[in-house]
Image (cartoon, rainbow, N blue to C red):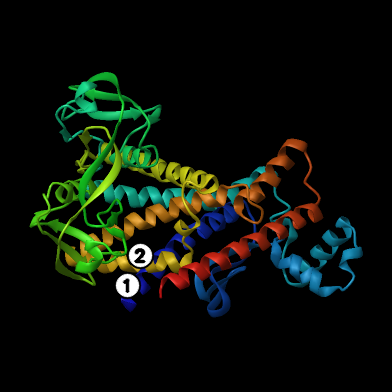
Amino acid sequence: MVLNVILAILVLSIIVIVHEFGHFIIAKANGITVVEFSIGFGPKLIHFRKGETEYCIKALPFGGACTMLGDEFLEMSVIQSEEDDEELSDEEKEAKKRKLAIENGYDMEKSFASKSVWARIAVIAAGPVFNFLLAFVCAVVIVGSLGYDPCDIDVVNDNSPATEAGLQEGDVITKVNGHKVTFYRDFYFYRYYNADKALNITFTRDGEKMTTTVTPEHIKQQKYQVGIMISENCTISSVSDDSPAKSAGLKANDVIKAVNGVTMETNSQITEAITSSGGNSVTFTVARDGKNVDVTVEPKMVEVESYDVGFVVYGDRVKVSPIGTLKYSVKEVGYSVKTVIQSLGMLFTGKIGFDSLLGPVGTVSTMSEIVEESKADGAFYVFLNLMNLAALISANLGVMNLMPIPALDGGRLVFLIIEALRGKPVKREHEGIVNFIGMILLVILMVVVLFKDIMALF
């Protein structure tokens, strides 16, 4: 388990290094002095100087910084050097910074603030851009190894909304209600949160583009269930109290490998196996703590409400050519970005809860569990799962850093864009106040999420 945590922290550190390296390399390319390049926060564990830059690894392995000349480094030095700095004008502060820089052997002509607004925009935007590049590299490895998951219809039920709409097995869904569908996951995500909506579907059949409308059928029925919720990767996300699954010993984070000896690859296959059991015992083979465990469950008949469309998509992956790999890797990054933005929207509208947020501790814990679950499939699949998580987290970090939130890259970009439009910078004290408030709010959010993550471990 310790090794799993180390691997998870290593992956997170690489994501942070890539982000900060983006700032670093573009700053260097624009002739900006980088005072410190650090990974982590807190006390320095390892540090050395090469040229004008000090490189550091710090005690807390979450986050990092690329501190440039004229950035917070000298701001803090000036503030500490005089007690009456608040009485100085911006011009006087700049003069003091220049003097302090010269005393410390720095050339203020190579400071961040001395460069053009477009150079500064490039430096700030480089961090998120490099995160998207990392997500793309990871996607290339995944798609190149496993292929992608087109939204091919695998099963069409008789006398169902799907048959009335004219859908057939083998049809490939490309759009639903105006939302482009590249992957099975696009369709799954949309249906999960819009189960009752009529589906205006665009699909291809034998290379021909066609459209139809599927009106979900509202069904109240008796159905066999075991009391589990399953995430997209066949992992049990939760087990209901007083359920057959709970009594039999199924646990959250178990990964369902097979049902009654039949290998399971998608959620739909698992659900179908349970509901078609006829009340007979169902044996789940699950991966748990690096081992495969058989758990026999007696399904229970319950009354459920659902919206049935009458067709099933398994989401099996299909190998593609090298050109196709590059194409779908770009689309994978686009999918990750779109999913993050949609999830943020649903968070603010209440469609998903605050519990869905993960901080560094929760992320490391989740990654550690996935590493453990993947061990039964071999080192290659551990590697692929880590690459998949790295792609998702890196794209997530890129999106979040571009949000116009004070103290983040996106917040700084807002001020720089305003400067480019108006031809002069926003007053530093105004920018400082906004960034200070943003930082306080971010710290509060981080503490709350950290507390939630730690409590979830127990």
Under tag 2, what secondary structure? helix
Residue at the left extreme of this rendering = 261
The mark nearer the N terminus, 1 or 2, is 1
- Amino acid type, label 2: Met
Position of residue 259 relative to residue 319, above or below, is below
In the image, residue 214 lies at what x, y percent? Answer: 29, 25
Secondary structure under badge 1?
helix
The answer for how far apart the CA atoms under marks 1 and 2 are is 8 Å
Note whether 253 is above or below 203 in the view shown: below
Residue wearing tag 1: 4
Residue of label 2: 367
Q: Nearer the viewer, residue 265 or 330?
A: 265
Picture coordinates of residue 222 (x, y %)? Answer: 21, 45
448, above or below 324, in the image: below
Residue at 17% x, 58% y is 257
Callout 1 touching callout 2 (CB < 8 Å): yes
Q: Which mark is residue 345?
A: none
The image quarter containing residue 77 is bottom right
Report crowding for label 2: few under 14, some 14 to 19, many 20 or more residues within 10 A (C-alpha).
many
The amino acid type, in three-letter code, at marker 1 is Asn
Left or right of residue 299, residue 351 in this image: right
- Looking at the image, can residue 395 be seen? yes
Residue at the spot 28% in from the left edge and 50% down from the top edge: 142
Name the image quarter holding the N terminus. Answer: bottom left
**Residue 195, position in %: x, y?**
35, 37
The residue closer to the viewer here, 354 or 89, is 354
